[in-house]
Image (tube, grey):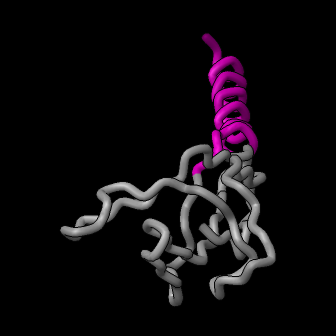
Amino acid sequence: MTAADVIATCALAFTLASFWLLYARAGKLEIVGEPRSYSFAASRGFIVTLPLVFTNARPLAAVAINVRLRLDKPGFPSIAPFVATRDGVKPEDTGRKMATSIVIQGRCLIPGVRL
């Protein structure tokens, strides 16, 4: 191999690695910060409303399919399933959207998702 072949091979490897790093990595969801407020009800079962902000810093979209809340305290269920989304923490009878997948495009965040 000549020096030109080595330089060309290194340039191609750098180009492919840069493309993967900037445009082809799978998305990864993260929750930004801790919830500062919540609501809790136990009259008709176990209901917790948490305001969460999801972010995806990677280039491809990420999907949250089965969001669950894990609790380590005795007397509470160990896992609370994701049932619905709400527009606010304050409970109102305006209806609520049932649980569905949450899709977050690459390099975006979704504020105000209430679980």
Residue 73, quarter of the rendered image: bottom left
Residue visible at 65% across and 40% down in the picture: 25
Taking depth in this image into account, of 114 and 108 the one nearest to the observer is 114
Residue 61 appears at what percent x and percent y? Answer: 73, 46
- Residue 54 percent across, percent down from the top left: 63, 65
Q: Position of residue 8 (x, y in %)?
A: 72, 24
Q: Quadrant of residue 83?
A: bottom right
Q: Nearer the viewer, residue 52 or 48?
A: 48
Residue 88: x and y in percent read: 70, 82
Report whether 87 appears left or right of 33.
right
Q: Is residue 92 left or right of residue 64?
A: right
Nearest the eye: 105 or 35: 35
* Secondary structure that dominates the magenta span: helix
The residue segment tinted magenta is 1-28
Q: Above or below — where is 12 with respect to 95? A: above
Vertical arrangement, residue 39 with respect to residue 85, above or below: below
Judge whether residue 111 is colored magenta: no
Name the residue at 73% across, 44% down.
Answer: 60
Look at the image and tell me in which quarter the N terminus lies.
top right
Q: Residue at x 76, y 61 (%)?
A: 97
